[in-house]
Amino acid sequence: MTDLGQLRQWVDESRHTVFLGGAGVSTASGIPDFRSAHGLYMEKKQGISYEEMLSHDYLEDHPAEFYDFLRNVMLYPDAKPNRAHYALARLEQEGKLEAVITQNIDGLHQLAGSKNVIELHGNENRYFCRSCGKQYDMRVVTESTGEPRCTCGGRIRPDVVLYGETLDQEDLYRAVQLAARCDLMLVAGTSLVVYPVAGLVNYLSRKARLVILNRDETPYDSRADLLFRGDLTQVLGELAGVE
């Protein structure tokens, strides 16, 4: 039996399959990943790291520059779901996938049709006023210059987790519960080095199977029951029968 055939059998047998994904899931949609050899984190802008520019402190101290950075580098308003996103949505529709846990903030899982999505790092299409709470979408940034302001004059911030901030504890708790209950976890497009998200693998029961689909090695490869180094969009697409 091929590895794909084995994976398909495990998915069919599973009662609680959970997907954990990172930036590599969206690279086929034209959104760069941040930690690979070709990712944004290997570049610099005026001597300041991308990680620093995506921090809470940078937003507070340099709001205009922070939003310019979002407009020029981080936001991809024209990005569309790729084969992997549609494959996961189909698996959920067929009752073969319980939930998607994602580190991505692009919202492409929902655009592809996935319903039960836990966005641990937030969503780049959601913004809110710190003063009155008014909600905005990405256009408040893409259709403005400098620091966008609310109609009430208040400061706006993205509904994402910046460096220096903690994850939403309710979302993290839900992710931990899903990991602890699942009997099959599919991990794709993530280096599994960013905690606490990477630590979700440690909540798997002894009976749960772990399948990793990632171009590069991860610290958890030795624990995986199956490893795929190829194109994750192809593997997931063939698994779900999505062209």
Image: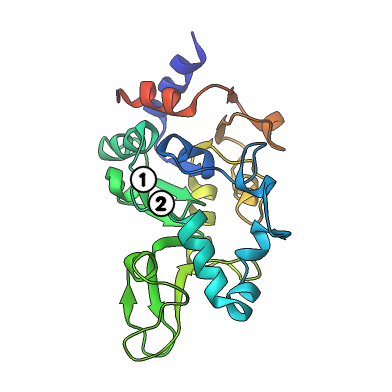
Residue 216 screen position, x and y as percent: 65, 30
Q: Which residue lies under the disc numbered 1?
A: 79
Circles 1 and 2, Cβ within 8 Å, touching? The answer is yes
- Above or below: residue 128 compared with residue 20: below
Distance in Å between CA atoms under marks 1 and 2: 6 Å
Give the residue type that dot 1 points to: Ala
Residue positioned 47% across, 50% down in the render: 101
Residue positioned 32% across, 66% down in the render: 139
Residue 8 screen position, x and y as percent: 41, 21
Give the residue type that dot 2 points to: Tyr
- Above or below: residue 131 compared with residue 88: below
Q: Which residue appears farthest toward the top when viewing the image?
A: 1
Residue positioned 55% across, 77% down in the render: 63
Please tell me whether mark 2 sits on a helix, a strand or a loop.
Answer: loop
Residue positioned 41% across, 77% down in the render: 148
The one of 23 and 78 positioned closer to us in this rendering? 78
Q: How is the image coloured?
A: rainbow
